Amino acid sequence: MLTTALTTAERIALLGFSDIVKIRNRVLQMRDVIRLEGGEPFMGTPDFVKQAMKDALDAGQTRYAPSSGIPQLLDAIRDKLAAQNRIEATTDQIIVVSGGAHGLFCAFQTTVNPGDEVLFFSPYWTPIRDQVRYCGGVPVLVPWEERLTGLQARVTDRTRVLYVNSPSNPTGIVLTRDELASIARFAVEHNLIVIADEAYEDLIYDGEHVSLASLPGMFERTITVYTLSKSFAMTGWRIGYVVAGEPFMGALRKIVLNSINGVSTPTQFAALAAIRHGVDHLAEMRDEYRRRRDLMVAALNDAGFVVPSPAGAFYLFPDVRARLGNDSWRAMEQLLERTLIASVPGVVFGAEGEGHLRMSFSTSIETIERAVEALHKL
Ligand code: PLP
């Protein structure tokens, strides 16, 4: 009988497991923690969206749907893209996926060969590095501060893909139209594929959201990934969509078919309601977040941290070096011990995040008020 130990496929070693989950596990063992370490909308999914799923279930919409998405939802997404994103796509250029994380996974699998270099700004949303490496790709990080010059300095013959996330997790940076136009020119000049992650497109407090795929010469080279998670407080529903032309869409269809064979049918009916009727909800939600952001920015700056007001998303990324030292893991521990505020060490989002902490303001106003009070006593 063979006794060799059973092992997983070698490529599994290329994937990490979230440090944020480790922090959550530690926080769950403590009492009265002020939880700012997460990244979930504080409110529940709007009632009209929940009702749409109940109606779909009652109407017997419980069978396999086309693996790329139900036609009504594809139509609604096409209309939304034209009106909101200035992206003129046909329904053949849209596919429904199981959330942004799945959409990004499919996008990287579609485009990155072993040895290909993938450019992205750092600090970055942590799964991106793993997803690139899982394709055998090489992450090439460009500090956000160098975003206008740093791409040119790091592009090589092996660069194939540029990933852009605006509004950004964790920094809250919203790239301006001029910045995006210059990134677009760079992508065209070097014939790069662009993966645009617009997960936070509806969470903009200052400025505007511009979709890279709407800029000249960009649609044909851009795979844009959207999710309903943040816009409609639907993190647990797992639904999003991807927009791209050929040859990418054909490849995306194959990956979606072979990985999930389509998103749950009743969930797609809920998404249809959210996209068709969600405008009022979006405006209310932005006002709530803006109020939380302003309270937290003032409290953090008063406490001696350095934090610009984030223009988008729902994260604060203060520089805490003056108060808590350079090591962001130690800074996170100290803040937790002294104020009961749970945060995420900036270094988790890349070396460029060292000396910072990420705190989310997507939480109840009571939690924000407790955080403000705790910071005043720090
Ligand atoms: N992109 C960014 C930058 C994110 O922060 C997230 C979630 O936190 C996602 C994509 C994906 O979210 P989901 O998989 O819930 O759609």
Image (spheres, grey):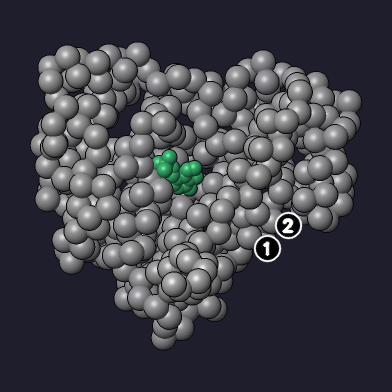
Residue 117 appears in which quarter of the rendering?
bottom left
Tell me the crowding category of disc 1: few under 14, some 14 to 19, or many 20 or more residues within 10 angstroms, Cα based: some
Q: What percent of the width, then of the height, locates residue 256? A: 24, 52
Quadrant of the rendering where the N terminus is positioned? bottom left
Q: Secondary structure at mark 1?
A: helix
Q: Would residue 108 appear left or right of 172 to someone viewing this image?
A: left
Q: Residue at x 77, y 51 (%)?
A: 328
Q: Which residue is mark 2?
A: 354
Residue 143 appears in which quarter of the rendering?
bottom right
Where does ligand 1 appear, by image quarter?
A: top left
Q: Pointers 1 and 2 in contact (CB under 8 A)? A: yes
Looking at the picture, does residue 266 appear above or below residue 158? above
Q: Amino acid at mark 1?
A: Ala
Q: Secondary structure at mark 2?
A: loop
Q: What percent of the width, then of the height, locates residue 333? A: 81, 42
Q: Which mark is residue 280?
A: none
Q: Which mark is residue 351?
A: 1
Marks 1 and 2 sit apart, C-alpha to C-alpha, by 6 Å
Tell me the crowding category of disc 2: few under 14, some 14 to 19, or many 20 or more residues within 10 angstroms, Cα based: many
Tell which of 279 and 117 is nearer to you: 117
Looking at the picture, does residue 149 appear above or below residue 201? below
Q: Is residue 171 visible?
A: no
Q: Residue at x 81, y 55 (%)?
A: 327
Q: Residue at x 63, y 17 (%)?
A: 365
Q: Would residue 283 appear left or right of 173 to someone viewing this image?
A: left
Tell which of 10 and 147 is nearer to you: 10
Q: What percent of the width, then of the height, locates residue 35? A: 67, 29
Q: Amino acid at mark 2?
A: Glu
Q: Would residue 169 appear left or right of 356 to someone viewing this image?
A: left
Quadrant of the rendering where the C terminus is positioned? top right
